[in-house]
Image (cartoon, helix red, strand yellow):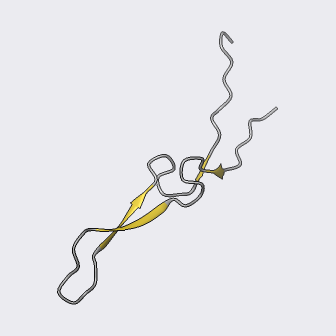
Amino acid sequence: MMPQTTPRVCRDCDGFATATITTGLPATDGTRATIPVHCPTCRGLGRTFPAALTRAGK
């Protein structure tokens, strides 16, 4: 039987892999600088692959 290789939704970010946050105070034109932050578990993909099945002692 082959292990399942279908990607699953990341359990840490629940599929919302990238968030945008502001860097602080507003600029002179009233806008705010933003930066994207990616989920460290899925590296911004929103999905993960299940761990390979291993058998101890075989």
**Quadrant housing the C terminus:** top right
**The image quarter in which residue 37 lies:** bottom left
**Residue 32 vs residue 6, the one in the foreground:** 32
Q: How many discs appear?
A: 0
Q: Is residue 6 above or below residue 33?
A: above
- Give percent across and percent down for residue 2: 78, 35
Q: Is residue 42 left or right of residue 22?
A: right
**Quadrant housing the N terminus:** top right
Q: Is residue 19 left or right of residue 47?
A: left
Q: Is residue 30 above or below residue 10?
A: below
- Give percent across and percent down for residue 49: 63, 44
Identify the residue at image location x=53%, y=57%.
Answer: 45
**The image quarter in which residue 4 lies:** top right
**Residue 23 vs residue 36, the one in the foreground:** 23
Farthest residue, direction right: 1
- Give percent across and percent down for residue 23: 26, 68
Identify the residue at image location x=65%, y=13%.
Answer: 56
Q: Is residue 38 above or below residue 52?
A: below
**Residue 30 vs residue 6, the one in the foreground:** 30
